[in-house]
Amino acid sequence: MAEHVARRCCLGWDFSTQQVKVVAVDAELNVFYEDSAHFDRDLLEFGTQGGVHVHEEGLTVTSPVLMWVRALDIILERMKASGFDFSQVLALSGAGQQHGSVYWKAGASQVLRSLSPDLPLHKQLQACFSISDSPVWMDSSTTAQCRQLEAAVGGAQALSCLTGSRAYERFTGNQIAKIYQQNPEAYSHTERISLVSSFAASLFLGSYSPIDCSDGSGMNLLQIKDKVWSRVCLAACAPHLEEKLGSPVPSCSVVGAISSYYVQRYGFPPGCQVVAFTGDNPASLAGMRLEEGDIAVSLGTSDTLFLWLQEPMPALEGHIFCNPVGSQHYMALLCFKNGSLMREKIRDESASCSWSEFSEALRSTEMGNGGNLGFYFDVMEITPEIIGRHRFSAENHKVPAFPRDVEIRALIEGQFMAKRIHAEGLGYQVMPKTKILATGGASHNRDILQVLADVFGAPVYVIDTANSACVGSAYRAFHGLRGPPSSIRQA
Ligand SMILES: Nc1ncnc2c1ncn2[C@@H]1O[C@H](COP(=O)(O)OP(=O)(O)O)[C@@H](O)[C@H]1O
Ligand SMILES: O=C(CO)[C@@H](O)[C@H](O)COP(=O)(O)O
């Protein structure tokens, strides 16, 4: 058993699309412990692909809520078995894939409050959810609810000015409206609705955690300037929604001390503080220590691009969220659904399932791909709404296929050109001092990052770990304890 030297620390968690991850960060902000539980590989009994179930009609996408609980049990048990000294944990925070929602059944708060330290969480929480399969961000089945919400507030731009985004299918208000309309009984048996982030925080608190303003901005329900729920949006989605959501809180709030369950079962100190959990993209913004003019590109299951903003300018494309670090500031975000899973498909088809062959193809082809262009959307894209594979030759003719190496470069150049074009559409300009900060699983791949640098004509940096959402969560735990360390904003 590995012995760990006593080291005061904060934990950062990430409940993302394909796995739950954790890091421990010491007072000098060094990461000294990392682990993860991967849903498809470590939790076979849930039968997910890429961490989700895509339903038959292709639009509804869900994840089993107990799978997330079980993943937490697995990691905590592994930490304990490795000799991790939980008594040194001053505080913890975390992140969740954005927009997904969890429906706690009436009576669940009582179960959360009286957890027995003799049993793992998943054994005790089995009957706590009125919806066992949570809708997640990949869901695009709520177009009707989106149109209803926009109509209720006076149109798409009006909704964007109020909440930071026009109505998007994956945004939680529209997902809740669908559940209320299609399954009113389950809705009425629901005493609390959490985001994935506040659900995970609730597991640590042993009571319902409030939703933080930054992740709350991904619901089409929060007035991003006043940081309160919009009454008109709530009413347009479902009845009694305000009481089921609880009030939103600033992202750096301490929401309480850790539940006695963790004190007794794992040896956490009773004073260990839980800082509000937030979305994985907001947590990455904290973890990457963005500065004005920088642009962050996260290459996780989704590809996202985000910036720190002083003044919000909500538009019909992209999202404005409350900033998770500077409570008076904002962040802009663009989300692309065809990210890593699309790259994996082309890798399997054109590079014998090997990232090193994929990289070799990028190295053996030239920047610009001889004029061949491709855009690949196997699932309905978010930015923009489009599906299918679209390839164009140097002569600008639509073609059905490319040679294998050309296909790989076309995919990666197309993905990054789309990011630059859509960012420029929002007013972003590449400047001489621009730095691109990359994170997420695909940021391990230097050849992919080289294409990113070529397309933007700017240098690309990666931090020591690709898990910026976890690291950002640990920084946010320190921030919640004692205000932001100056080094968090100065990379
Ligand atoms: N060497 C690599 N080259 C390209 N992509 C990679 C590489 N290693 C991992 N990935 C991608 O990283 C993805 C997972 O990214 P990650 O940020 O951990 O996901 P999430 O946080 O959304 O669960 C995988 O789906 C995989 O395609
Ligand atoms: O929908 C969005 C952002 O709006 C996604 O970025 C999710 O937050 C999922 O994140 P990853 O698991 O891909 O990091």
Image (cartoon, grey):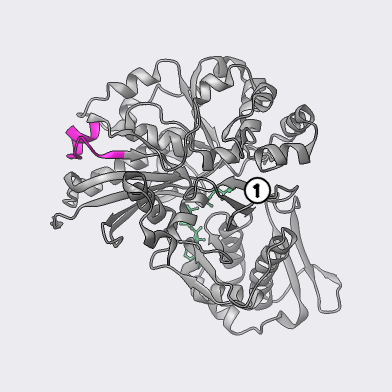
Q: Does 7 sit left or right of 275 as displayed?
A: left
Q: Name the amino acid, label 1.
A: His
> Which quarter of the figure has residue 140?
top right
Q: Does 400 sit left or right of 347 as displayed?
A: right
Magenta region: 261-273
Along the line of sight, the residue nearer the viewer: 249 or 335 = 249
Q: Is residue 147 above or below residue 231?
A: below
> Which quarter of the figure has residue 143?
top right
Q: Does 327 sit left or right of 264 as displayed?
A: right
Q: Ligand 2: does it lie within 8 Å of the C-beta at label 1? A: yes
Residue plotted at (40% across, 21% down): 127
Residue plotted at (59% across, 79% down): 361
**Helix, strand or loop under label 1:** strand
- Quarter in which the N terminus is drawn: bottom left
Q: Is residue 206 above or below residue 188?
A: below
Q: Circle 1 is placed at which residue position?
A: 319
Q: Taking the image as drawn, is residue 17 in sight?
A: no
- Picture coordinates of residue 221, whole percent (x, y): 62, 32
User: Magenta stretch: residue 264 in it?
Assistant: yes
> Which quarter of the figure has residue 420?
bottom right
Residue plotted at (17% across, 44% down): 87
- Quarter in which the C terminus is drawn: bottom left
- Picture coordinates of residue 467, whole percent (x, y): 42, 58
- The crowd level at tag 1 (other Cα within 10 Å; few <14, some 14-19, many 20+) is many
